[in-house]
Amino acid sequence: AQKVTQAQTEISVVEKEDVTLDCVYETRDTTYYLFWYKQPPSGELVFLIRRNSFDEQNEISGRYSWNFQKSTSSFNFTITASQVVDSAVYFCALRTLGSARQLTFGSGTQLTVLP
Amino acid sequence: GAGVSQSPSNKVTEKGKDVELRCDPISGHTALYWYRQRLGQGLEFLIYFQGNSAPDKSGLPSDRFSAERTGESVSTLTIQRTQQEDSAVYLCASSFLQGAYEQYFGPGTRLTVT
């Protein structure tokens, strides 16, 4: 069985602060893929990043960065210099090749960036 | 290009009625997924279609739920004899093939059963 845990239900920060969203996953498969999605108030899920289990290199995209650590089964997401438009629910998800094809989602973290 | 589209965007129905939700995937995407998102919660997998293969129905919560897909195009999710606990946002996603490819989501259909 696979599982994704996002322990932070809600986070509030003031604009320009940095914020890290935690994601811990569980799987017995050696090949798997991790994803982050953003769900703004409009409701539509927006794909942010995909990372495969063989690539532990951290990635930076503008103000976004991701820290993948297999040793702790974590795939954390950091937003630098947060902006009000970053306010959304962020979901971490896991997909393996050995089991069903669907994404297993965490319960999400509601991020509120205050002006 | 066009993204995943879903209709209707909102649906209010009386308990016991049947509803049909529609999903148009991104052109060229062979894989299609349905998820359910209850208020304030994460997404629950319902069903998966890949080309002409038999669908993976392992996430359907009861036999009141069914889905169809014609080839690699439109899919319809049907809920029979709706119950209040069926109230949720139903999200459709599509992707190239399967495996690593990211899924692109539609805007969802908000279903309210009164």
Image (cartoon, coloured by chain):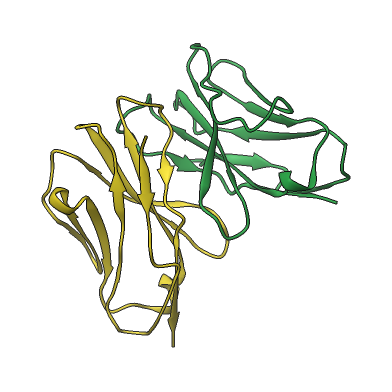
Q: Position of residue A31 (x, y in %)?
A: 21, 32
Q: Position of residue A71 (x, y in %)?
A: 13, 50
Q: Is residue B51 left or right of residue A67?
A: right
Q: Position of residue B36 (x, y in %)?
A: 59, 43
Disc count in the image? Answer: 0
Residue B92, relative to residue A105: is it above or below? above
Location of the C terminus of chain A (image quadrant)? bottom left
Q: Is residue A80 left or right of residue A103?
A: left
Which residue is located at x 62 percent, y 34 percent?
B23
Residue B77, relative to residue A35: is it above or below? above
Q: Is residue A50 left or right of residue B92?
A: left
Chain identifier of the green chain:
B
Which residue, as the protein is rendered here, is positioned at the far left?
Answer: A57
Quadrant in the rendering for residue B24:
top right
Which residue is located at x 30 percent, y 48 percent?
A25
Which residue is located at x 61 percent, y 30 percent?
B60
Location of the N terminus of chain A (image quadrant)? top left
Quadrant in the rendering for residue A109:
bottom left
Chain identifier of the yellow chain:
A
Residue A15, relative to residue A53: is it above or below? below
Residue B60, relative to residue A12: is it above or below? above
Q: Position of residue A76 (x, y in %)?
A: 25, 60
Which residue is located at x 27 percent, y 39 percent?
A33
